[in-house]
Amino acid sequence: MLIGSHVSFGKEQLLGSAREADSYGANTFMFYTGAPQNTVRKEIDLDLLEEAKKFMFEHHIVLSKVICHAPYIINLANRSDERKWEFSIQFLKNELSRCDTLGVKNLVLHPGSAVGLPKQTALQNIADALNIVLSENYSCKILLETMAGKGTECGSTIDEIKTLLDLVHFPMGVCLDTCHLNDSGVSISSFSTYLEEFDQKIGMDKIGCIHINDSKNELGSHKDRHANIGYGTIGFQNLLNVIYEEKLKDVPKILETPYVGKTEKEKIYPPYRFEIEMILNQTFDEQLVEHVIEFYNK
């Protein structure tokens, strides 16, 4: 099984990311090449990159299965301000170039938000931008993420994702997100039915990553608030069914669940080591928070 979580990309860059993932018992991971909310990016350190590759080889983390995530500030859907739209295009190109330098093969991208435009116009804007970006032949593939449908988000249905894939003239893939699917109206308890429709309309081979998140929201709420595994409305067994789906066994599964602590005002800690244990043991931990706090306060 390819299981991991979101990790940081700090001073040690990919080396630090790999070390953090390994500390959680993961064999893959997802990272941003800089803060997802801004454009500040440090040059890739090639010496650290070589150390990272060595570390990953020694700890059985396959670089081609590692996932990068594009920053949130990219919005290809709205072209009302041409300069902002062109900025998003250039920034996405920069992120793909950084991924190529790192040797990362998949970049997850939120399709974007229409922000007042008709949905079909927004989808065309996204496709036009992606055709411009991908004409430069990057080695890294873009994976369009399925969204919750919050506000004017695009890509919250199979049909919208299919429209984008059809309009773009270059190979792309898809990243499923269990919380987003739930919040968009897809019942994870009927995940096999969803997969059948996805395979019929798009093709199972397009799925390049799955974000494994429980949801704090009811089915179809269009809110997008992640919960820890088994602590939300989706439920532990339903998420296990997604994770252990035989047709998706070679697809990286990435946790984006919240950090935990006694209260939100006190120090909070990553739960991933314990959530990965739950998944591998297929046993729900009813004292997840207590176990995480105890571990990090030893």
Image: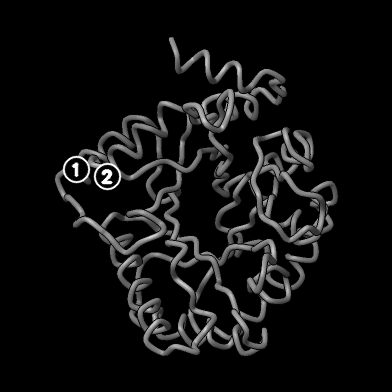
Percent from the top left, x then y, of residue 147? 65, 63
Does residue 13 appear to the left or right of 25 in the view shown?
A: left
Check disc 1 and give the amino acid type. Leu
Q: CA distance from mark 2 to mark 1?
A: 7 Å
Q: Secondary structure at mark 1?
A: helix
Give the total number of marks visible in the rendering. 2
* Label pair 2/1, CB-CB below 8 angstroms: yes
- 38 displayed left or right of 80: left
Q: Is residue 92 left or right of residue 15?
A: right
Q: Residues within 10 Å of mark 2 (few under 14, many from 20)?
A: many
Per the image, the residue denoted by label 2 is 13
Q: Is residue 113 left or right of residue 139?
A: right
Picture quadrant of residue 11: top left
The N terminus - image quarter: top right
Q: Residue 128: where, in percent of width, then height?
A: 49, 88
Q: Which mark is residue 111?
A: none
Residue under label 1: 48
